[in-house]
Amino acid sequence: MRQNMKLYLDFNPCQECNTMMAELSSPEMLFADEKTRADESAKFLRHLTYNHNEVVQAVMDDLPKQKRDQEPDFYK
């Protein structure tokens, strides 16, 4: 079973981010096969990781809180 997690990030996207986000939300990508979508999403995440330190910091700050919130009560 695959779990999904959503992160809402507040950052100023650069021109390359805007281009990639437009491509990811294009009709061609929305109807592309799963591997193509995953590859393009990974490309965008790599860009964020290497070019936007504020995004990495926000993820690092938020992940521990989300993980704790998602643990079942019997782990507490």
Image (cartoon, rainbow, N blue to C red):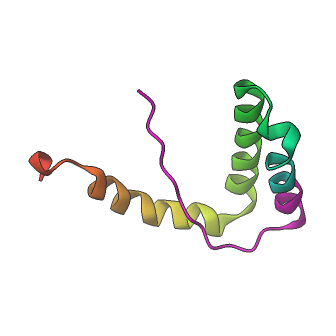
The image quarter containing residue 57 is: bottom right
Q: Reply yes or no: does residue 3 show up in magenta.
A: yes
Q: Residue at x 70, y 33 (%)?
A: 38
**Residue 64 placed where, x, y %?**
36, 58
Q: Split into 4 quadrants, where in the image is the N terminus?
A: top left
Q: Is residue 41 above or below residue 62?
A: above
> Between residues 8 and 45, which one lies in front from this camera angle?
8
Q: Is residue 65 above or below residue 50?
A: below
> Between residues 38 and 59, which one lies in front from this camera angle?
38
Q: Residue at x 71, y 64 (%)?
A: 52
Q: Reply yes or no: does residue 13 show up in magenta.
A: yes
Q: Residue at x 74, y 34 (%)?
A: 37
The image quarter containing residue 13 is: bottom right
Range covered by the magenta-colored residues? 1-19
> Between residues 76 and 1, which one lies in front from this camera angle?
1
Q: Residue at x 63, y 69 (%)?
A: 54
> Between residues 41 and 47, which one lies in front from this camera angle?
41
Predominant SS along the magenta part:
loop
**Residue 76 placed where, x, y %?**
11, 53
Q: Is residue 75 above or below residue 18?
A: above
**Residue 72 placed where, x, y %?**
19, 47
